[in-house]
Amino acid sequence: MRIAITAKGKGLEGEVDPRFGRAENFIIFDTEKDDLAVVDNKFNVNAVQGAGVQAAGKVVGERADVLITGHCGPKAFRVLSEAGIKVYTGGTGTVGEALDMYRNGSLDEAREPDVGGHW
């Protein structure tokens, strides 16, 4: 399983970025290989529009099965859902802590976006 987590840093010790589309990085954790990769999202940090959809495209391209983030808007949520990626909002703390929250079942799968567009 591949888990994407929005991050302000480049490892498990970095904070979860609450903004999906404008997150600094995505940490992609592969549970089968027990390793991680950092995917830069800086191009979208200051995008005028379309940051969520473009970021969703990156996560889809990384073959993620799950996304953990603070918040996710409607257009990005639609792209992720159509690709079969389960979205978990409410991720907080460090990337490592958010990963542990997912593993122990303390994050709820989002059924819809939790913020409006251009958040």
Image: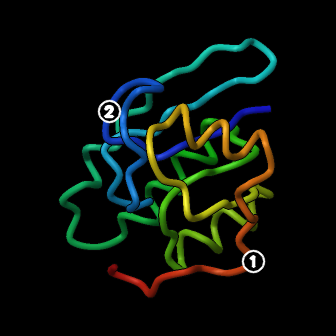
Which percent across, then down, holds residue 72?
Answer: 52, 70
Secondary-structure class at tag 1: loop
Q: Residue drawn 59% across and 64% down?
A: 89
Determine crowd level at label 2: few under 14, some 14-19, many 20+ residues with C-alpha closer than 10 A: many
- Along the line of sight, which residue is nearer the eye, 106 or 46? 106
The residue under label 2 is 9
Distance in Å between CA atoms under marks 2 and 1: 27 Å
Mark drawn on residue 111: 1
The answer to which quarter of the image holds residue 33 is top right
Against 59, residue 34 (above or below) is above
Decide: is 3 above or below 52. above
Q: Residue 74, labelled with which disc? A: none
Query: Which residue is found at the position 38% from the left and 51% from the top?
Result: 17
Q: Residue at x 38, y 62 (%)?
A: 19
Q: Residue at x 30, y 44 (%)?
A: 24
The reply, left or right, for residue 47 in relation to residue 96 is left
Q: Position of residue 115 (x, y in %)?
A: 47, 82
User: Judging from the image, what secondary structure is the residue with disc 2 in?
Assistant: loop
Whichever of callouts 2 and 1 sits on the residue coming sooner in the sequence is 2
Residue 84 is left or right of residue 48, and the answer is: right
Between 80 and 33, the one lying in front of the other is 33
Left or right: 94 as drawn, with respect to 99: left
Q: Nearer the viewer, residue 50 or 117?
A: 117
Picture quarter with the N terminus: top right
The image quadrant of residue 51 is bottom left
> Three-letter amino acid code at disc 1?
Arg
Amino acid on which the number 2 mark rests in the picture:
Gly
